[in-house]
């Protein structure tokens, strides 16, 4: 809802999907489309002990986590978070949790399924009354919302082992119905685009269809002592009556990979602008890394997507063009499944080894790739532009032999990367952990003013 309680979105019929969310009134880039607290969540195992199990705050010099003395496996940033989770669910799981995660049944699960097993245990513990025989009023409403969601195309025939004790048959039946909806409805929660938990957001799952060229994206707001809140943010201006879509997967994945994943997990073939266009491409071989042929294609990609190689054309980057214009067929070899991960690795390796000038070359190509594949203001573009800014700063700081016009050119390039990052990530807005990319941008802007 907006401040005057008018709906931001409306659910209307869709020709192939169950329904679609459309803008109730015109939206501008950066507008809040939808906000929803997480119904239930479970941290990835790699995040246990690093984050508060209730509010997901990250441990730091200022935030000291305390361990539950009962199970020694749940951590909290303060007494209030511990009390809230104890009352809502943890008192029903605490004593059993150590034996549960050590059990053969749990250990036999994949890491992904282990998180979902704990997520299901959390939900059952919280939404059912203590004895498990009946459902609270809130639980009945929640179950109704969850049951409106479509089952996964390949729904599991069994549920994973639960941490809950003495679960009645009627509750087990409900748990099975819920679990059959996990695979195609749950969200992977992230902070600064780094995954850290699985979460259930029923209304978002029910409302927003997928597109590989979305006009909105999800972010996650971490607030001390409160459950994490999802916010759906407009990437660009959206006219009244236009459908609002989000990505269910990374739009930069190859066409066939996206189609197979969407059909396997969600049961549909994507016919968005990007898929309809790139689906007509042949599959030319990727030129050998280091070859003149690949270097020529990459140089043309940079000129096409970014303008001058010395200073980014921000207006060109911000233009909202159809895929048939953004991705000319001559760049088809770069859509090969190995190109993006290999180029990312090249950039990362050179950056970490201090080879900043070569890192900038690979990173600029990577930025150009993102600009043509991702929609306008997609946060991954901004995050990579920020990484390029830091790489350029390191190149300036560590290469004292770069003088005169070369140094000025590098400084100008850094400023243009930083401007792109600032525009895109400020549109996305604050999210995730404290001291994130917006703070890094502020620091780099301050440093650049001291030159």
Image (cartoon, grey):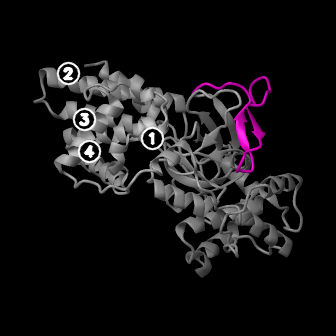
Task: Judge left or right: residue 440 versus residue 47.
Answer: left
User: What residue do we see at 53% from left, 67% from top?
Assistant: 111
Task: Judge left or right: residue 103 versus residue 353.
Answer: right
Give the quarter of the image for residue 156.
Answer: bottom right
258 up-or-down from 113: above or below: above
What is the magenta range?
A: 1-29
Residue carrying label 2: 408
Q: Are marks 3 and 2 in contact (CB under 8 Å)?
A: no
**Closest to the observer, 157 or 209:** 209
**Closest to the observer, 313 or 269:** 269
Residue carrying label 4: 351
Residue carrying label 3: 394
Instruction: Examine the rendering and report whether any part of residue 101 can be seen.
Output: yes
Give the CA distance from mark 2 to mark 4: 21 Å
Instruction: Examine the rendering and report whether any part of residue 48 can be seen.
Output: no
Q: Are marks 3 and 4 in contact (CB under 8 Å)?
A: yes
Residue carrying label 1: 380
The kind of secondary structure element at disc 1 is helix
């Amino acid at each position: 809802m907006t401040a005057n309680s008018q709906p931001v979105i409306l659910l209307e019929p869709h020709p192939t999907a169950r329904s679609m969310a459309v803008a109730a009134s015109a939206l501008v880039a950066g507008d809040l489309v939808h906000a929803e607290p997480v119904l239930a969540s479970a941290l990835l195992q790699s995040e246990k002990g690093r984050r508060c199990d209730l509010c997901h705050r990250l441990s730091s010099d200022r935030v000291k986590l305390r361990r539950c003395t009962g199970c020694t496996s749940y951590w909290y940033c303060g007494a209030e978070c511990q009390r809230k989770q104890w009352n809502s669910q943890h008192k029903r799981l605490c004593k059993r949790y150590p034996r549960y995660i050590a059990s053969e049944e749990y250990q036999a699960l994949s890491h992904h399924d282990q998180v979902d097993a704990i997520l299901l245990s959390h939900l059952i513990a919280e939404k059912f009354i203590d004895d498990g025989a009946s459902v609270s009023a809130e639980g009945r409403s929640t179950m109704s919302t969850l049951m409106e969601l479509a089952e996964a195309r390949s729904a599991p025939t069994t549920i994973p082992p639960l941490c809950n004790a003495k679960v009645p048959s009627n509750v087990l039946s409900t748990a099975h119905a819920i679990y059959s909806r996990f695979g195609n409805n749950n969200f992977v929660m992230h902070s600064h685009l780094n995954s850290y938990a699985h979460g259930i957001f029923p209304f978002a799952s029910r409302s927003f269809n997928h597109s590989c060229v979305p006009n909105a994206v999800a972010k996650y707001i971490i607030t001390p002592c409160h459950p994490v809140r999802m916010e759906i943010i407009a990437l660009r201006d959206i006219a009244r009556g236009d459908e609002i879509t989000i990505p269910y997967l990374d739009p930069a994945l190859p066409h066939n990979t996206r189609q197979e994943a969407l059909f396997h997990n969600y049961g549909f073939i994507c016919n968005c602008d990007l898929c309809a266009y790139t689906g007509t491409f042949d599959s030319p071989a990727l030129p050998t890394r280091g070859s003149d042929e690949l270097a020529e294609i990459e140089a043309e990609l940079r000129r096409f997507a970014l303008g001058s190689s010395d200073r980014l054309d921000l207006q060109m980057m911000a233009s909202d063009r159809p895929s048939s214009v953004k991705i000319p067929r001559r760049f088809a070899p770069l859509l090969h499944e190995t190109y993006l991960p290999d180029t990312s690795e090249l950039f990362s390796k050179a950056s970490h080894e201090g080879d900043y000038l070569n890192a900038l070359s690979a990173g600029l190509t990577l930025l150009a790739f993102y600009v043509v594949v991702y929609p306008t203001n997609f946060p991954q573009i901004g995050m990579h532009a920020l990484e390029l800014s830091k790489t350029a700063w390191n190149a300036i700081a560590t290469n004292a032999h770069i003088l005169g016009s070369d140094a000025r050119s590098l400084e100008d390039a850094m400023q243009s990367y930083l401007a792109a990052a600032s525009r895109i990530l400020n549109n996305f807005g604050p999210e995730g952990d404290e001291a994130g990319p917006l703070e890094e941008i502020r620091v780099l802007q301050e440093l650049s003013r001291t030159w």
